[in-house]
Amino acid sequence: MYQLDIYSSSNKQLLKLKYGLELDVPGLKHCGVVRQEEVNGILQNYDICILTHGFTGDYNEIEYQTIFPTRTIPLLLSGKPILAHSPPHTFLTKFLKDRDCAEVVEVPDETVILQSLNRLVQDSKRIEVLMNNQKEAAEYFYGPKVVKSLKLAIQTP
């Protein structure tokens, strides 16, 4: 049995009405919003982090392909393995798979998600690989490195 704590700016009623997510069941807990300065500390309370990317909804196709959830970077830096639920053919999925820094589930299927979670929990070698790769992936967003890349891009005709 797993405990899933959901941090979202959407309140419980909205999550239920809009997405059909029932949060008044054992194993699920709505924790509300996390302030940016609290994210890193809160992540340390968990064994695995789940990164979600929508499959359908109010965004257009280009937005779904290019969205990069803002919590991705703190998750990469958390020192915790990441299970990402993200559709194929998106930048996020490609980024995570190319760097092998998260266990990625590309289908909206609860059974597949649970199977991937169980595999991840049971495979300490896979967790080690993911966590080592997360460190390298996080370097992609290191401020001075980003600035250097931008300056180089501007100078290149």
Image: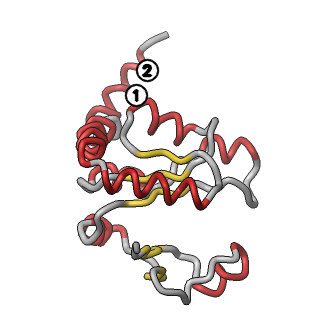
Q: Residue furthest top?
A: 157
- Picture coordinates of residue 53 (x, y %)? 57, 54
Secondary structure under tag 2 reads helix
Above or below residue 156? Residue 31 is below
Nearer the observer, 86 or 68 = 86
Residue shown at 49%/55% (left/top)? 115
Nearer the observer, 63 or 132 = 132
Nearer the observer, 51 or 111 = 111
Is disc 1 surrounded by few (<14), some (14 to 19) or many (20+) residues within 10 Å?
few
Residue shown at 26%/45% (left/top)? 131
Residue shown at 53%/40% (left/top)? 93
In which quadrant of the rendered view does residue 54 lie?
Answer: bottom right
Secondary structure under tag 1 reads helix
Q: Which residue is identified by label 2?
A: 153
- Picture coordinates of residue 46 (x, y %)? 29, 68
In which quadrant of the rendered view does residue 41 lie?
Answer: bottom left
